[in-house]
Image (tube, grey):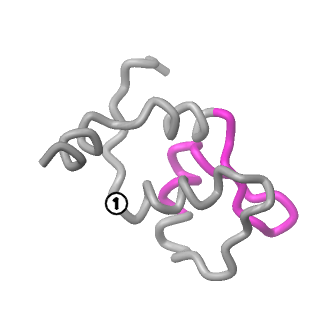
């Protein structure tokens, strides 16, 4: 996969990634549809029945998105 690929994630998907970034953070209620979408693109996996951010997901979260930066400035 090309590292220059821009992920077009919804605000809910970005929030889910942010909430999963800490190993101790295990939100009790996450939208399964949102998590399934993140699993589909390889940003989240399921370990022991719990969603966990993947190394690829962590990289995407750190890198951010131009869409997020635009929203922050606006």
Q: Please indicate whether residue 35 sits to the left or right of residue 69 in the image.
A: right
Secondary structure under tag 1 reads helix
Q: Residues within 10 Å of mark 1 (few under 14, many from 20)?
A: few
Magenta segment boundaries in residue numbering = 36-55
**Picture coordinates of residue 14 (x, y %)?**
43, 54
Indicate the position of residue 72 as horizontal and vertical percent values: 24, 47
68 in relation to 19, above or below: above
Q: Position of residue 11 (x, y in %)?
A: 34, 60
Does the magenta segment cover residue 19? no
Residue behind mark 1: 11
Please determine whether, in this image, residue 51 is positioned above or below residue 5: below
Placement of 1 over or under 59, stated as above or below: above
Which of the 4 image quarters holds residue 52?
bottom right
User: Residue lying furthest right in this view?
Assistant: 48
Residue at image point 52% right, 34% down: 62
The residue most toward the front is: 73
């Amino acid at each position: 996969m090309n590292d220059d690929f821009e992920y077009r994630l919804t605000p809910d998907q970005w929030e889910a990634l942010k909430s999963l970034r800490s190993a101790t953070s295990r939100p009790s209620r996450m939208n399964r549809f949102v998590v399934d979408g993140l699993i589909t693109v390889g940003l989240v996996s399921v370990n022991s029945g719990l969603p966990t951010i993947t190394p690829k997901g962590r990289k995407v979260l750190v890198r951010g998105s131009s869409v997020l930066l635009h929203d922050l400035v606006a």
